[in-house]
Amino acid sequence: MSVNDDVLLVHGGTPLEGEIRVRGAKNLVPKAMVAALLGSEPSRLRNVPDIRDVRVVRGLLQLHGVTVRPGEEPGELVLDPTRVESANVADIDAHAGSSRIPILFCGPLLHRLGHAFIPGLGGCDIGGRPIDFHFDVLRQFGAVIEKRADGQYLEAPKGLRGTKIRLPYPSVGATEQVLLTAVLAEGVTELSNAAVEPEIEDLICVLQKMGAIIAMDTDRTIRITGVDALRGYNHQALPDRLEAASWASAALATEGDIYVRGAQQRSMMTFLNTYRKVGGAFEIDDEGIRFWHPGGQLKSIALETDVHPGFQTDWQQPLVVALTQATGLSIIHETVYESRLGFTSALNQMGAHIQLYRECLGGSDCRFGQRNFLHSAVVSGPTKLQGADLVIPDLRGGFSYLIAALAAQGTSRVHGIDLINRGYENFMEKLVDLGAKVELPGQALG
Ligand SMILES: CC(=O)N[C@H]1[C@@H](OP(=O)(O)OP(=O)(O)OC[C@H]2O[C@@H](n3ccc(=O)[nH]c3=O)[C@H](O)[C@@H]2O)O[C@H](CO)[C@@H](O)[C@@H]1O
Ligand SMILES: C=C(OP(=O)(O)O)C(=O)O
């Protein structure tokens, strides 16, 4: 995509109507691809979306000697890790790209090669995003970590041994780090205060198919019994509940009606409850979920993001755009990332009334109270939005700006749209299919 392609003109005021499809989850697929590194034979992953985070991990795996090729059905990848030991790894930095995933190569590479090099990480700029939990748990397994100018170098001189770990916070990435390391470690690992997001359960399903022994208790404890070797897997990735919720929020904000094929009730229950409280309508069938604005006024709500089964933080930004159209004061308390509300200043430029606070507004005190982070918001609505010049700050913030521009009167210029390709497959085609009036300057869409 050239620099000029990275701007989208959005002519707002048209409800989004029609059907789109979501495929495998951005927060599962790249991790399942990394899991293939642990196997002694090829794995098949189905329902793989064509998004940048998948391409980045594909490049990293290939660099490590994994052959990745399309399978028989569309969206299927076959990952063959049988030649990892003979790979000559070079130029890893160039492939790290914008994703968080390279950190999850640690355990699998330590098992296979006895060493690993992890370059700087990407991912959304929505808080400090430290990786201290990852390195703490790897040390507990027996890894030795050396910080170098261009990244982290790891070795496991005595191999990796099962251990008892308690996470300070139920981090998704650190839980996955433990899973991907413990399955081939010697002995039993007991992880408490683990994250239990649906994508983690799906990763556990992948690992169990490979031959791992993993038990999940009801109290955030996961017990992994290390095994000597793992096979390949054949797995259909769970659908992207975060993308599905983004389109649901778009339907609400634009007074539209969108059938999201692939959306699943089970992984979206908390979102669906909130959607209903706001006044959004939905109807669930075996193939997907239809989301629509039923007419009348939307209702303001108090919303707190949290780890699963709480309200997922990645659902927050798109829903906030819809809340600018709700009557009264909505309160948002972001408890997962300290800086995930900065995107609201552009919404204010468009006519929204959103005030940020350092205090924990809403139900509970969180890690960010008293620490000077603007992590609570009060949204006062409804407000008419006007088109504006917008610069995309991060993945979900970017999609939120698209929704705001579509809900607004007039034309917006949305800069930096390529970032949205990191987690939304074919989003421009989907917008066109839903009747959005969008154009890439100098090019026809749809
Ligand atoms: C690729 C992927 O799956 N990304 C998801 C994953 O990110 P990711 O796995 O990076 O998020 P985590 O759950 O680890 O982060 C949650 C919190 O823990 C903190 N933390 C995390 C690790 C660490 O070593 N130290 C530390 O302090 C973070 O700063 C953050 O405040 O889960 C997030 C929370 O559901 C989602 O928003 C992201 O979309
Ligand atoms: C924060 C997100 O992703 P990542 O962890 O990949 O930056 C996201 O998907 O909203």
Image (cartoon, rainbow, N blue to C red):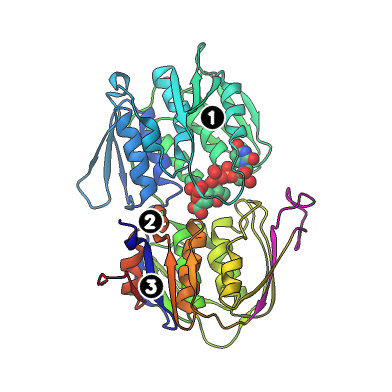
- Sequence-first tag of 3 and 1: 3
Q: Nearer the viewer, mark 3 or mark 1?
A: 3
**Mark 1–mark 2 CB contact (< 8 Å):** no
Relative to 387, say whether 225 is above or below.
Answer: above
Q: Is residue 4 visible?
A: yes
Please indicate whether residue 117 sits to the left or right of residue 68 in the image: right
Q: CA distance from mark 3 to mark 2?
A: 17 Å
In the structure shown, which secondary structural element does the residue marked by tag 2 occupy? helix
How many residues crowd around disc 1 within 10 Å: few (fewer than 14), some, or many (20 or more)? many
Q: Which residue is mark 2?
A: 421
Residue type at the position of mark 3: Leu
Q: CA distance from mark 1 to mark 2?
A: 35 Å
The region drawn magenta spans 358-381
In the picture as drawn, the residue positioned furthest to the left comes out as 72
Image coordinates for residue 408, horizontal then vertical, percent: 49, 80
In the structure shown, which secondary structural element does the residue marked by tag 1 occupy? strand
Q: Nearer the viewer, mark 3 or mark 2?
A: 3
Prevalent SS, magenta region: loop
Please indicate whether residue 307 sits to the left or right of residue 318 in the image: right
- Sequence-first tag of 3 and 2: 3
Task: Identify the image quadrant of residue 84.
Answer: top left
